[in-house]
Image (cartoon, grey):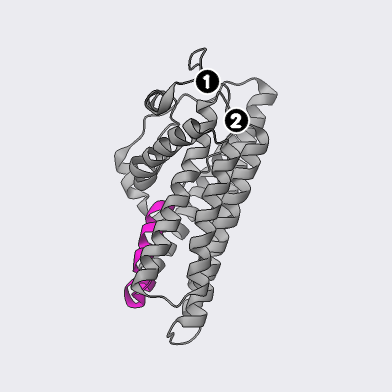
Amino acid sequence: MTAPSGTASAPQAQGHRPPEGFGEALARLASVQKSNKGAPAYSRFVNRKLGRVLAALSYVVGLTPNQVTAISATFTFTGIALIALVDPAPWLGAAVCLALVIGYAFDAADGQLARLRGGGSRSGEYLDHMVDSAKISSLHLAVLISWYRFGDLDGAAPLLIPVGFTVVAAVMFFGMILKDLLARAHRAATGAPPPAPAPASTLRSLLVIPTDYGMLCVAFLLIGFPTVFMPLYGLFFAGNLLFLLAASVKWFREVGSLDAT
């Protein structure tokens, strides 16, 4: 899972007139991208670029950021429903992967569209985060249901993997949201400037691939091959659990540093 991306942002200095057409909208979006610091590889090199194209198209046809969020939710929860309701088969993997990947790309597009339009809204940020929080838990609960209904399991122990993944994903998302919220509240109260953007590390983007929601979406291509998908899903769970344990300590220290000031 990647860091949360809200639709709200401060107005951008993009010029005094709106973009004219898809090409200019796409060019402007290239200059108002978020920092890539901490972004996993798929999210950084694939999803944000797909989101940029979708944001430019959405701008041209007159969609709002909240409408783009709704489109993202429609694709994402369609894929999640297929996981829970349909017996795994090779064709199902392609359908689920496509739905989740498109949903994730539109999730990147809503914030970019907001920046292109001059800034988002608090209600848009709220809506975006609520959809994100619903999808990261329901995705793993859908896997739990699928394994329980259709899996040829040797006992109930494997079901603990999606249960644990649900907890880890929810806690990680909440931790990132809360850490950022506390830092923003601290800056508002003290007048401290926001931290300077740090350069993105390609090595780090590759190392945190196990936490990359986009790569997890791609992994669902293999849901029709349980002997391959189940161990792979377990590896994603282990990677996210280890990351959460390490990140929680780091985040606690960062929040603690706010107390010192």
**What is the three-letter code of the residue carrying label 2?**
Gly
Membership of 162 in magenta stretch: no
Residue at (49% x, 75% y) in the render: 146
Where in the figure is residue 109, as x and y percent of width and height?
A: 48, 39
Residue at (55% x, 56% y) in the render: 135
| Residue matched to label 1 | 12
Secondary structure state at the residue bearing disc 2: loop
User: Between 253 and 76, which is closer to the camera in this rendering?
Assistant: 76
Q: What's the magenta bit mostly, secondary-structure-wise?
A: helix
- Quadrant of image for the C terminus: top right
Which labelled disc corresponds to residue 235? none
Where in the figure is residue 89, as x and y percent of width and height?
A: 37, 75
Span of residues in magenta: 213-231
User: Between 159 and 120, which is closer to the camera in this rendering?
Assistant: 120
Q: Inspect this view and state whether residue 37 appears.
A: no
**What is the three-letter code of the residue carrying label 1?**
Gln
Residue 158 falls left or right of residue 70: left
Q: Is residue 41 above or below residue 58?
A: below
Q: Inspect this view and state whether residue 69 appears.
A: yes
> Could you classify mark 2 by the number of other residues whose Cα lies within 10 Å: few (under 14), some (14-19), or many (20 or more)?
many
Which labelled disc corresponds to residue 120? 2
- Residue farthest toward the right in the current orientation of the protein: 189
